[in-house]
Amino acid sequence: MNARAFWLLVRNQGLGFVREPAAAVFNLAIPFFIILVQAFAFGNDAIRQDDLPGYTGADVLPVGAAVIFVMIIGVFGMGVGLSSMAESRTLSVFRLRPGGVGSILSAYGLVLVALIVGGLVLSTGVLALGWHIRAPARPLTLVPFTLVGCGLFLAVGAFVAAVSSSPRAAQGIASAIFFPLLFLSGAMFPLDDFPAALRYLAQALPGYHLNETFAYSWFRAQDAPWVSLGYIAGLGCVATWAALARFRRREDL
C-alpha cells in the first residue's frame, strides 16, 4: 500500500469517529468531563505531599488526564473498535487487499493515538487557562512516554478484541480491565491512603507504572522511571504477541 492510500485510510478511520457521536463522546468527552469536575472540586486545594510543595490540585490533574486518556482510548477504543471490525468482516476483507490487515490496524491505531493527544492538549489547555497550572518539568519526555503508554494499552485493547465474540462482549471485558487499573493507578486517588495489600497490588499493575512515567514528566521531585518504562514496554510486547496469537486462531477472520 502506497503512502497516499494509507493516509486516505487514516482519514476514513478518523471520519468514523466524527460520524459516530457515541464513540467520540465516550472516548473524549467523558475523560475530559472527569478532569473538569476534579478541577472545579479540588483545583485550588493545596497538595499535601512533601515532594510537591506549592502544588495545587489542578497542577497534578494533567498526569491524571494523561493516564485516563491513554487507558480509556487504548482499551475501549481499540477493544470495541477492533471487535466491531471483526464482526463486520472488515478484517477479513483487508486480508485480500494491499497492505493486508496490518494497514487498517495501523491506520486505526494512528487515529486513536491522535485522539489521545488531542484529549491531552484540550485538557491541559483548559487547565492552563482556567487554573494557571504549572508547566511540565520535563516536557521533552512527554512524547516518548505517551507513545510507549499508547503502545501498551492499544495492545491490551487488541487482546480484548481478540478474545471477544462481539463488540458488546468487548465492552464488558474492557470495563472489567479498565476500572480496576484506573482506580489503582494513583491517578484518581492517592495510593498512600490505601491499605498496604492494595498498594502492593497497585504496584504490580500497568496503570501504576503509566502514572509514574507521566508524574516524572510533570513533577520535578521524581526519580527517573526506568523500571516503569521497562515494565510498560515489556508488557506491551507480551500483549501484542498474545493478541496476534489469539487472532490467528480465530476461525471467523
Image (spheres, rainbow, N blue to C red):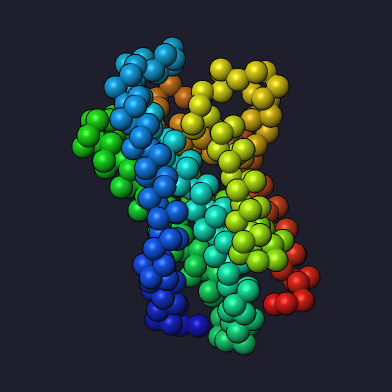
Q: Nearer the viewer, residue 84 or 67?
A: 84
- The image quarter in which residue 136 lies: top left
Please indicate whether residue 145 sits to the left or right of residue 38 in the image. Answer: right
The tally of labels here is 0
Q: Is residue 138 visible?
A: no
Q: Nearer the viewer, residue 4 or 239?
A: 239
Name the spot of residue 186 as percent of width and height, x first.
Answer: 53, 29
**Picture coordinates of residue 203, whole percent (x, y):** 64, 30
Q: Is residue 31 above or below residue 21?
A: above
Q: Against 145, is 133 above or below? A: above
- Residue 212 in percent (x, y) is at 52, 32
Q: Is residue 5 left or right of residue 228?
A: left
Residue 180 is at least partly visible in this image: yes
Residue 130 lies, in percent from the top left, at 22, 34
Query: In front: 138, or 15?
Result: 15
Q: Is residue 112 left or right of residue 118?
A: right
Find residue 8 and report its image quarter: bottom left
Q: Residue at x 35, y 53 (%)?
A: 118
Q: Is residue 120 above or below residue 138?
A: below
Quick one: which residue is furthest to the left in this view? 129
Query: Residue at coordinates 42% horizontally, 71% vertically from top-left?
Result: 16
Q: Identify the residue at horizontal 56%, vertical 33% (top origin).
A: 183
Q: Quadrant of the C terminus?
A: bottom right
Residue displayed at 48% across by 41% down:
67
Q: Is residue 33 above or below residue 11?
A: above
